[in-house]
Image (cartoon, rainbow, N blue to C red):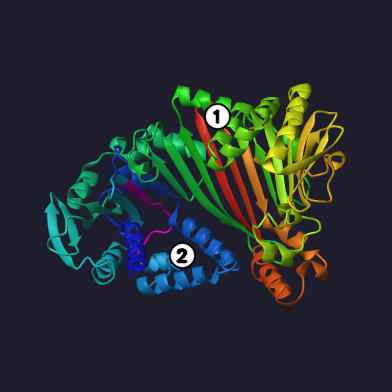
């Protein structure tokens, strides 16, 4: 019931509007022209038909993933409740929406908000709104108010309700508001002149310039209390968040859909200086040395001091690091900024045994299942090597046995279980390796660079890439013996066929890029056609 009401309220926030082509007062140029400047946050959209087409294509492609059919079911249920499909041009027109213009919502004092939304048939929209507000969303009481020359319909769930909904037609847009006195917000929108609206806010213009073309742009000004639901402090600077989805037509051997989220956050000068010092970038040349078929690759652009600070934030490492008596800190301090690491399936993985042992690393080494490669460049090779020598002397107290050959160290522990291999090559490459089938001398620039720029392959900030297609391909090459026998084999093959293989189309890119005036971040989730 709560999810249905939430869906209906989302609809009400995007379908209350008026005609932009009918005779009468001049239409507002954009939806945000009608909204106030002093807001806790705001959302503006691309033309509604663009948003609908992108989301519909994304839902179709996501339906091929495990449990993705639930998305299609949810869309059908929503269309049934509304009486039209909001994800098509025809559905929007049937509800009276104008598909060729965008909408906007201003969060004035959450949970209060006011929205301006485009319509092609205002009377149809207002009747639809009335029906859904009363019958579906629970706003059973309606009263009509006169605010100057404006006629406002006000809805409440009961006579004692403080939060109400209101709707009216203003300059070619339908304006809907929620709050203690939503009629006052709508009257203010009607009286607002173009230069006084949110459309002229330079901070919103900056957000659009930095985020580019997006289906949705969310903006929150410095000092906004809106993020207090997620973080303890108000925003130190303006924040913009863009969300868009794209889809290429599925065809034989092609087609892809993706969701892209972009974020920027302005920071005061002292915080910005600290961010640049902590995340100077680096490590791009190391990405080329990682195994080409590794499903997960990470480039950490952290400064050594920041890496140590992050290690200090992990309580489970405190006791271990205390035994090392600073040797680990000396090693990290001898490195250049930037590191790279990858995780993949071990070459000789036994999927059945991995399921049986799970995370019991006292009986089975994790590197029988996972291949780890972590790389960095030394800024001071003698200091780094001396620190590794000290580490080798300290590790037996933690239950690890260390064998050394030259500048290469191999850990074993427990009943003959293999740990990581670490050391420094003569060219200053520091490495930590876990798993069979890879040696320090085999680390060469064999991973192909992508044809299009990617944050993973640049020296700016930090980035992560997760390609589950590569994991599925690695598992697909395994011999039958890797699945065990009997019930063990059944569970192992079920895991591969029902989870790993269906997730083959997923690819995730994540980046954090500090700049001269703040932090930019990006998240892209791709669903690639087989």
Q: Is residue 275 left or right of residue 480?
A: left
497 relative to 195, above or below:
below
Kindly check if marks 2 and 1 are in contact, taking CB atoms under 8 A apart as contact.
Answer: no
Q: Which residue is mark 1?
A: 515
Q: Which residues are magenta?
A: 96-106
Q: Position of residue 154 (x, y in %)?
A: 18, 59
Q: Position of residue 353 (x, y in %)?
A: 73, 65
Element type at mark 2 = loop
Q: Splitting the image into 4 quarters, where does residue 18 fall? A: bottom left
Q: Is residue 3 magenta?
A: no
Q: Nearer the viewer, residue 345 or 85?
A: 345
Q: Residue furthest toward the front?
A: 397
- Quarter of the figure that contains the C terminus: bottom right
Q: Is residue 33 left or right of residue 316?
A: left
Q: Splitting the image into 4 quarters, where does residue 176 fall? A: bottom left
Q: Position of residue 167 (x, y in %)?
A: 23, 57
> N-terminal of the two: label 2 or label 1?
2
Q: Is residue 407 left or right of residue 211?
A: right
Q: Position of residue 460 (x, y in %)?
A: 64, 32
Q: Which residue is mark 2?
A: 87
Looking at the rendered image, the disc whose residue lies closer to the viewer, 2 or 1, is: 1
Element type at mark 1 = loop
Q: Alpha-carbon neighbours of circle 2 within 10 Å: few (<14), some, or many (≥20)? A: many
Does any portion of residue 62 appear in the rendered image?
A: yes
Q: Nearer the viewer, residue 330 or 155?
A: 330
Does any portion of residue 457 appear in the rendered image?
A: no
């Amino acid at each position: 019931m709560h999810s249905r009401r939430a869906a209906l309220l989302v609809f009400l926030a995007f379908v209350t509007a008026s005609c932009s082509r009918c005779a009468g007062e001049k239409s507002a140029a954009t939806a945000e022209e009608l909204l106030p400047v002093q807001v806790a946050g705001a959302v503006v959209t691309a033309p509604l038909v663009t948003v609908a087409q992108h989301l519909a294509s994304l839902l179709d492609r996501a339906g091929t993933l495990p449990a993705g059919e639930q998305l299609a079911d949810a869309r059908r249920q929503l269309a049934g409740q509304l009486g039209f499909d909001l994800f098509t041009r025809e559905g929007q027109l049937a509800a009276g929406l104008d598909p060729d213009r965008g909408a906007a919502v201003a969060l004035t004092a959450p949970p209060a908000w006011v929205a301006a939304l485009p319509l092609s048939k205002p009377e149809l929209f207002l009747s639809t709104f009335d029906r859904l507000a009363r019958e579906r969303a629970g706003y059973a009481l309606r009263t009509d108010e006169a605010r100057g020359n404006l006629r406002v319909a006000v809805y409440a769930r009961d006579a004692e309700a403080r939060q109400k909904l209101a709707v009216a037609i203003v300059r070619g847009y339908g304006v809907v508001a929620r709050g203690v006195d939503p009629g006052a917000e709508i009257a203010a929108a009607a009286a607002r002149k173009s230069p006084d609206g949110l459309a002229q806010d330079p901070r919103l213009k900056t957000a659009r310039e930095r985020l580019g073309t997006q289906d949705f742009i969310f903006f929150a000004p410095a000092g906004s209390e809106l993020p207090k639901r997620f973080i303890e402090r108000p925003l130190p600077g303006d924040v913009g968040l863009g969300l868009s989805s794209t889809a290429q037509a599925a065809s034989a051997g092609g087609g892809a859909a993706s969701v892209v989220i972009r974020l920027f956050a302005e920071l005061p000068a002292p915080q910005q200086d600290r961010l640049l010092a902590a995340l100077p970038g680096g490590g791009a040349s190391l990405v080329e040395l990682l195994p080409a078929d590794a499903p997960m690759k990470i480039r950490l652009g952290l400064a050594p001091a920041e890496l140590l600070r992050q290690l200090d934030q992990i309580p489970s490492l405190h006791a271990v690091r205390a035994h090392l008596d600073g040797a680990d800190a000396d090693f990290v301090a001898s490195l250049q900024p930037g590191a790279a690491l990858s995780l993949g399936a071990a070459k000789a993985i036994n999927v059945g045994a991995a399921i049986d042992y799970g995370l019991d690393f006292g009986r089975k080494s994790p590197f029988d299942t996972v291949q780890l490669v972590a790389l960095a460049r030394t800024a001071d090779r003698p200091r780094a090597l001396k620190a590794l020598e000290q580490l080798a002397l300290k590790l037996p107290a933690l239950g690890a046995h260390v064998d050394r050959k030259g500048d290469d160290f191999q850990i074993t522990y427990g009943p003959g279980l293999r740990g990581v291999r670490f050391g420094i090559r003569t060219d200053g490459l520091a490495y930590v390796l876990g798993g069979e089938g890879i040696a320090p001398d085999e680390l060469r620039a064999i991973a192909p660079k992508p044809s299009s720029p990617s944050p993973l392959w640049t020296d700016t900030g930090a980035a992560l890439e997760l390609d589950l297609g590569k994991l599925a391909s690695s598992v697909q090459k395994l011999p039958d013996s890797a699945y065990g026998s009997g019930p063990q084999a059944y569970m192992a093959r079920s895991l591969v066929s029902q989870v790993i293989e269906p997730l083959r189309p997923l690819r995730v890119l994540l980046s954090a890029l500090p700049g001269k005036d703040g932090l930019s971040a990006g998240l892209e989730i791709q669903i690639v056609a087989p």
